[in-house]
Structure formats: C-alpha cells, structure tokens
C-alpha cells in the first residue's frame, strides 16, 4: 500500500477538519433554531389534531424536496462539478458554469411541473399518505399542503445553491440559511399564537414557511452568482458532464424515492396509532436528527468535495479515501456514542427541557423518551453510513448505495409494521407506543445497511480499522457517564424540566469527555475548532 505520509496529507486533514467545523457550525445554528421552533410549536399545539395536520402537510411537499434536493444533488452534481473545478483550467471552469446552469434549468422545469401537479392532486395525496385522517382534520391538511407546496420548489433551488457553495468550499452559508426559515416560523407563532385558534394558526405558519423558503434561496443566490461568473442557464444536454450528472442522478433519485417510500409507510402506520402519534414521531425525529446532522452530515458533506477531487488524481487515491474514512468514522463515533446513551437513559430529560410547556405535558415527555430510545438503536449506523455513502458517490458509484438502501427500506417496512401494529397489543401496552417500535425497527435496518456499505467499500478500496479499543473506551465512558446522569436524575426529580436538564446533562457530558479523552481532551477540543 502506498504511503500517505506526504507533505500534502496534513494540509488535507486540516482542510477537512475546518470544512467539517464550518458545516457543523451552520447545522448547529439551524438545528438550535429548529429546536426553538419546535418548542414554541409544541407550546401552542401540543400533540393535537392540528399539530398532526400541520406536520403531515409539511411532510408531503417535502417529499419533492427530498427527491430533488440536497441528498440527490450532493451525490450526482457535486462529484462532477468539483472535479471540473479541481483541474484549474479556463476551459473546465467555463464548462463548470455551463453544467451548473444546466442543472438549474432542469431542476426549475421539473419542480415547476411537480409543484403544480401536487397542488392539483393534493386531496388524492392525503388519501394515499394519511388515510386515517377524516373530516375537519383531513380538510385542514389539504389546505395546508396547498399552501406549502410552492415552498418545496424553493427548497430544491436552495439545494442547487448548496451544491455549488460546497464545491467551492463555502460551507457555512449553505448550512446556516435554514435559520431564516425557522425565524419566519417562530415569528408567526409568537405573533399569531396567543390570539388565534389552532386551525387558523396552522394556516398562518404555513404561509410563514413559504416566506422562509424564499429567504433561504435568495440569501444564497448572490454568493453563488459571484462564484460562478460563467453561469449559463440553458439545458446543455450536449455536454458530457451534464449527461454524467443525469446518469448519476437516476440511481440516487430512485434511492431517495425508496427512502420516501419508507417515510410514506411510517405516515400511514402512525395515522392509525391514535391522536398525536405522527406529531410525536416528528417531534422526536427533530431531536434525533441533531446528532445525525451535526456529526454525520457535517463530516460527510465536507468530505464529499474533497474525496471527489482526490479520486482519479493519483495512484494512491484508495489510501487517501481510507485515511479520510478512518478519521471521519472516529470523529463521528466520539460524539454519536454518548448521544445514543443519552437518548436511551436520559431521553425524558432532553425532551422535557425542549418541549414540556403549555399543551405539551409530562406524559408527552415520557412518550417522546420511548421514541428517542428507539431512535438510539440505529443512531451510530445511520451517521457513519452517510460517510460510506459519500465515499461511493465520490467514486461516481451511485448504484451500490441504492441497492443497500432498498435492502434497508424493505426490512424497515416489514419490521416497522410488526413492531408498531401487532406488537403493542401482544405486550399489553397502549397502541400509541407502536411509534417507538417504528424508530427501533428503523435502527435495526440501519445497521444492516451500514454493514453492507462497509463490506462493499472494503472490497473496492481495502478495509479501514477504526480501532476496537478506541470504540470500547468510548462506549464504556458513555455508559459510566449515563449511569451517573441517571442517578442524578432520580435524585433531583420533580424540578423544572429546564433546570433538571442543566443538573443532569451538563455533568453527563463533562464526565464523558473526561473518561473518553482524559489527557487528550485539550488536543481534541483544539482539533474541533482548527480551520483550514
């Protein structure tokens, strides 16, 4: 194996750390804003029928954004576009501008058609996705979907901006602009919430959501135009690079469609689990996605352009990919493992601190804890799996992740139904706890996908060793810290949820850091904030 100890290696590592930090910083700001939005939403809506209607409505047009948005463009567009930029030639920079313009034109046409079709077909979509909704709840959901659909088209175009910004190593803006969307929603909730009925409030924040989507796109557009002076808005189907993007787009589009099929099935199942079940699932997912985004997405997103520049550049690209994978997987594990233990042992503390207010009661908090505990089952697999998928995308292989995604989703659907519908009655518990069965079954399926991705990539570029002793130290530190946090929680039970969180989660985090890193902690913290 060729040595990777070249003078360029430290520079590459520093650049990756700096890029991951910028992505994580942007995501952190947007997720914190999202948690604040969810806390305000929970205060006014609780787990009511209006909350179910709004969350379902928000999910349906987001189907369009998920199909054509960030994940698909990252896998199909960034490897081609970043590869052109890496050549540093005038001809390829001109071609990069034409490719970017062609992708914009294609996305604009497709999303315009689909948004119009979605608005017209909304009643049928509700019947297909939430068949358990009837009467006023169904009518409210239809109205909200029609309001929200145009915002999904703006989200797709924001994802196009993200692809260009990431390829130019401008990470912070693209991942922090969702703050604008959250601000628009929070402002509408605070302004109209105190004196508006729940149905009317849901409609007003739907309009605020569309305004926030527009703000996201137009905040990025000027920077994008400055980075791509050769931008040409035309279809450009004669360009080989554009055809490559389209070829890559197909498998990833299907893969995202398969993922959306799983979300569709979850929506159907949740609609039969009683009042507030779908809202509780989405509320828990907001917390669950925080470590996924901060530690999985940030590293995977920052590594994809760098991997795309490395691939094909020289003979030791396999060694470079292995080195990037090991560094990324170790960093992900360091932060995600304590998140897993926190979800399982202290999920009520986390959910209570964020949501318990107004119509969101302590009973709702305990329910969220069960759903979070189920989410923790596959948290490590889903975050590390993103990095493996990025490696395949950098290799311009979008079909292998697709095959394994189909395996995962198929298993998720089967296990999700069994764990959510027949299992709670067999255990003699309230059917609403089937929502926790949905999240736990998805975690089991996530581990299957992770193992398949790791095995397949090892066959292609060689195996990477994260280190058994390293992982064991992290797990032991997290379990020990979690046990201490649990004892503290029992000792101070009954306090205000936010004060309880400070008294429990702060010692938990500090003890984990001390046990996991010890004398290496100062170096770890310095590495997190080191910029390129």
Image: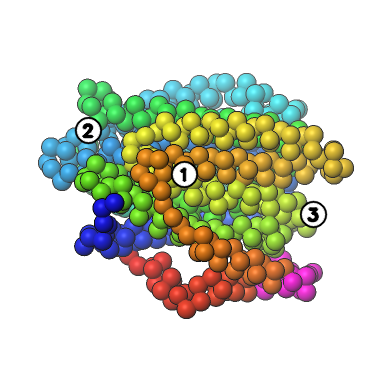
Measured along the vertical axis of the image, is residue 25 above or below residue 244? below
Q: Residue at x 68, y 57 (%)?
A: 344
Residue bearing mark 2: 98
Residue bearing mark 3: 363
Percent across and percent down for residue 309 are 26, 46
The mark nearer the N terminus, 1 or 2, is 2
Mark sitting on residue 175: none
- Quadrant including the C terminus: bottom left
In this view, the mark in front (1 or 2): 1
Q: Residue at x 34, y 57 (%)?
A: 16
Kindly indicate the quadrant of the structure image that contains residue 494.
bottom right
| SS at circle 1 | helix
Q: Residue at x 62, y 45 (%)?
A: 443
The CA distance from mark 1 to mark 2 is: 35 Å
- Region rendered in magenta: 487-504
The CA distance from mark 1 to mark 3 is: 40 Å
Residue bearing mark 1: 454
């Amino acid at each position: 194996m060729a040595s990777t100890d070249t003078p360029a290696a430290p520079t590459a590592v520093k650049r990756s750390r700096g890029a991951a930090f910028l992505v994580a910083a942007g995501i952190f700001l947007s997720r914190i804003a999202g948690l604040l939005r969810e806390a305000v939403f929970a205060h006014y809506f609780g787990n009511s029928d209006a909350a179910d209607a709004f969350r379902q409505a928000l999910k349906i047009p987001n189907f369009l954004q998920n199909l054509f948005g960030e994940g698909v463009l990252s896998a199909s567009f960034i490897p081609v576009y970043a590869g052109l930029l890496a050549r540093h030639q005038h001809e390829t920079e001109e071609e990069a501008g034409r490719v970017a313009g062609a992708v914009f034109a294609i996305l604009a046409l497709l999303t315009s058609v689909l948004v119009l079709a979605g608005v017209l077909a909304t009643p049928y979509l509700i019947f297909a996705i939430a068949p358990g909704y009837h009467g006023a709840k169904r009518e409210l959901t239809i109205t909200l979907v029609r309001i929200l659909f145009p915002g999904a088209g703006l989200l797709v175009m924001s994802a196009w901006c993200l692809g260009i910004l990431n390829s130019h190593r401008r990470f912070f803006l693209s991942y922090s602009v969702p703050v604008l969307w959250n601000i628009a929603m929070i402002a509408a909730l605070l302004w109209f919430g105190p004196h508006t009925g729940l149905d009317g409030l849901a409609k007003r924040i739907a309009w605020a959501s569309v305004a926030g989507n527009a703000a996201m796109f137009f905040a990025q557009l000027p920077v994008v135009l400055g980075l791509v002076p050769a931008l040409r808005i035309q279809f450009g189907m004669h360009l080989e690079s554009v055809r490559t993007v389209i070829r890559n787009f197909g498998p990833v589009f299907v893969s995202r469609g398969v993922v959306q099929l799983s979300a569709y099935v979850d929506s159907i199942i949740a609609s039969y689990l009683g009042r507030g079940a779908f809202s509780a699932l989405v509320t828990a997912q907001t917390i669950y996605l925080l470590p996924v985004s901060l530690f999985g997405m940030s590293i995977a997103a920052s590594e994809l352009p760098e991997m795309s520049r490395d691939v094909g550049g020289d003979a030791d690209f396999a060694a470079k990919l292995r080195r990037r994978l090991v560094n990324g997987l170790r960093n992900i594990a360091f932060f995600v493992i304590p998140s897993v233990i926190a979800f399982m042992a202290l999920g009520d503390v986390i959910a209570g601190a964020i949501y318990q207010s107004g119509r969101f009661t302590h009973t709702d908090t305990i329910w969220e804890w069960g759903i979070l505990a189920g989410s923790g089952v596959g948290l490590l697999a889903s975050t590390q799996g993103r990095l493996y998928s990025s490696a395949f995308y950098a290799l311009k292989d979008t079909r292998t992740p697709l095959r394994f995604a189909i395996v995962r989703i198929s298993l998720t659907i089967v296990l999700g139904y069994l764990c959510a519908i027949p299992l709670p009655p067999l255990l003699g518990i309230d059917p609403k706890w089937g929502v926790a069965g949905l999240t736990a079954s998805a975690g089991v399926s996530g581990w299957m996908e992770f193992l398949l991705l790791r095995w397949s990539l090892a066959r292609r570029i060689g195996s990477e060793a994260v280190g058994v002793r390293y992982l064991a130290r992290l797990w032991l530190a997290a379990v020990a810290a979690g046990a201490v946090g649990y004892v503290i929680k029992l000792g101070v039970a009954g306090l205000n949820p936010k004060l309880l969180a400070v008294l429990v989660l702060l010692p938990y985090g500090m003890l984990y850091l001390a046990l996991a890193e010890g004398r290496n902690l100062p170096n770890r913290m310095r590495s997190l904030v080191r910029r390129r």
